[in-house]
Image: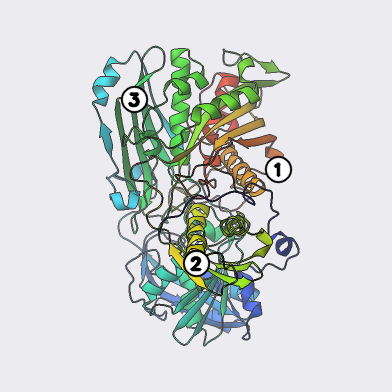
Amino acid sequence: MTATPIRARSMGTHLTRLDGHEKVTGRATYAAEHGFTLPERPLHAWLVTSTIPRGRVERVDASDALAHRGVVTVVDHTSARRLAKPDDAELAVLQDDAIAFRGQIVAVVLAETIEAAREGARLVRVHQTPADSAPQVVIEDGEPYTPEAANAGHEPDVVQGDVDAALARAAVTVDATYTTPHEFNNPMEPHAVTATWDGDTLTLWDSTQSVHGVAAVLGRALGLARGKTRVLAPYVGGGFGSKGLPHAPEMAAALAAFAADGRPVQLAVTRQQMFALTGYRTQTESRVRLGAEPDGRLVAITHDALSQTSRYKEFVEQTATAARMMYAADARSTTHRVVPLDVAVPAWMRAPGEMPGMYAHEVAMDELAVACGVDPVDLRVRNEPEVEPETGNPFNERRLVECLQRGADRFGWADRDPEPGSRLVGDWRVGLGMASATYPALFMPGNTARIRALGDQRYAVDIGAVDIGTGARTVLTQIAADALGVEPGRIELSLGDTALPKATVAGGSAGTSSWGTAIVLAAQQLRADHGDDPDAGVESSSTSEGYPDMENLALHSFGAVFVEARVHRWTGEVRVPRMLGVYSVGRVINPTTARSQLLGGLVMGLSGALFEDGYRDPRHGHVVTQDLATYHVASHADVGDLQVEWLDEEDTAATPMGSRGIGEIGIVGTAAAVANATFHATGTRVRALPVTADHFLG
Ligand code: MOS
């Protein structure tokens, strides 16, 4: 059965966040708080981590720690439960004596209080022997290679036409290299877990974007029978990708709890430890070459992306993939290379690939606009492709030009001075910049929703999805209400538990699309099977395979970001008083929560543009800036007049709700728009994020 589009009644209205009251009154329980709800008092876990980048653990001396009051036990690689399948090196925690990076978990201290656990961790003496050869921890030291397509999520290299010939013939060319630094997910709630064993059954309350994903991966690695791993995540205090897959701390908590004699264990990863143990956005280097006719029409696009991975596990930032579908050009080449280093493994961070990639591509487009003497908005309009360049598939909804024009009108783009560096207001140089944004309308198969009619037109809707703070609980309720033809107040939605039907990750901006489609399918099946008898006590589940037609349609969201930047003429300080994002994202199911997602994406893009910069120690490879004092993220004082709007649309080719995803597109292109605005303000082109004051001095 395939779903048919549903009529919007609740969808499109500002339904108040259903869990808002629990959250603001402190009644919502987060992962590390569940220990207090259990009959057995929990033990507190504290992670002990390696201090050398590569080598061996000779011995973990826990004698002083165990002598400390309140410390119960110390688990290390000699005592931890063995994994059945230790093939994922990141999750093979405490399985042998190898040290692959500085900051790796080498022991876990369990104690009666969190203070005792922390002091116990300080008292553990880890004897480590460095490897004979020097570790490689900076990208300049390593040898780039071509990654596995499977890890890149796409073919690493795609070449169409003869780019070198096209570039040689082009009237105007841009050839520049753009860099982005290591960036780190900093959700408000750190990674945290409460773990408990009951015989051979493991239960985790986890701060995760995917309860079923964590259960499957951990259960398999531990060799547990199906159904013997239960994961719950009723409330999650944010996640931008780092909670999309299980990382080492979850396994550490599970192993520690196994050693805890039946007592639950609760672990909150410290903010500092998150910089090594929960993934991060790798630094990237993008060489972009553009060739164009004198009027700016592109004839060639190349994007060669270099990033860094870890030697023990491959992760590939898919930096160049947006250049495959964004603009028209006959010749195109996009490549990915990675350098393996003796450092912690990178992972997902909001719009992995698109964020650094579209920064590079959209600054290069701004450089091309200058080189051709064409307005940056017009340049993008001139390079609209008729079909998706990589596949030749028709775009289902490509309304980039409307976003650009709407944004330009609303932002006052027409009044922009043609010459960069020509406006001074007091001591501030003022400029306007813009960039395009895009994100694919991803859809994940394999979701099941269960709906039971409870009588009196009430329905229980069950799906093992997770609301990580996005508002999923609220919008899924609206979707269910419209699919069943009742008021949202008649829906009792349950999520965040593997005891509920299988659901995919809250990631790839695909949660609402994928889960919502499964809910619509189940509702329509319930109606088909039971007609107009809404009070029948039935269950109906449907998977969402086969929807939508991603083989033959190019499904993407688009946007345009406009920025006013001010650069102080004497200090180089950069301020962004105004930002506007205009988006085409399909139907907006809840304008309140959608606006928050898009605003959050813009703020995170601003943050990446101006502040975020993980500094890696070139000797040991650990991140020095491992707190929110030295790793600065944008805060209230950094954000000026921030506006978002969206086009009125309904994309029923993407989902029966007419929606696409909105979680990530807000960050895409935003850093480029900021950088381009600072160029327009000053005439100085910055090709390295973050765009800091020093670039504008001297
Ligand atoms: Mo997001 S990086 O898709 O969790």
The C terminus lies in quadrant: top right
Amino acid type indicated by mark 2 = Val
Apparent side of residue 48 relative to residue 311 in the rendered image (left or right): right
Asked whether the beta carbons under mark 3 and mark 1 sit within 8 Å of each other, the answer is: no
Q: Which mark is residue 329?
A: 3
Residue 506 drawn above or below residue 361: below
Q: What element carries label 1?
A: helix
Disc 3 residue lies near ligand 1 with CB under 8 A: no
Q: In whole angstroms, how far apart are the C-alphas of marks 3 and 2?
A: 42 Å
Indicate the position of residue 312 as horizontal and vertical percent values.
Answer: 34, 59
Q: Which mark is residue 636?
A: 1
Q: Which mark is residue 463?
A: none
At 47% from the left and 50% from the top, the residue drawn is 508
Viewer-proximal residue among 236 and 392: 392
Asked whether the beta carbons under mark 3 and mark 2 sit within 8 Å of each other, the answer is: no
Indicate the position of residue 545 as horizontal and vertical percent values.
Answer: 38, 58
Q: Mark 2 points at which residue?
A: 211
Indicate the position of residue 325 as horizontal and vertical percent values.
Answer: 38, 34
Amino acid type indicated by mark 3 = Ala
At 56% from the left and 39% from the top, the residue drawn is 605
Crowding at mark 3 (Cα within 10 Å: few <14, some 14-19, many 20+)? many
Quick one: label 3 or label 2, which is nearer the N terminus? 2
Q: Quadrant of residue 382?
A: top left
Amino acid type indicated by mark 1 = His
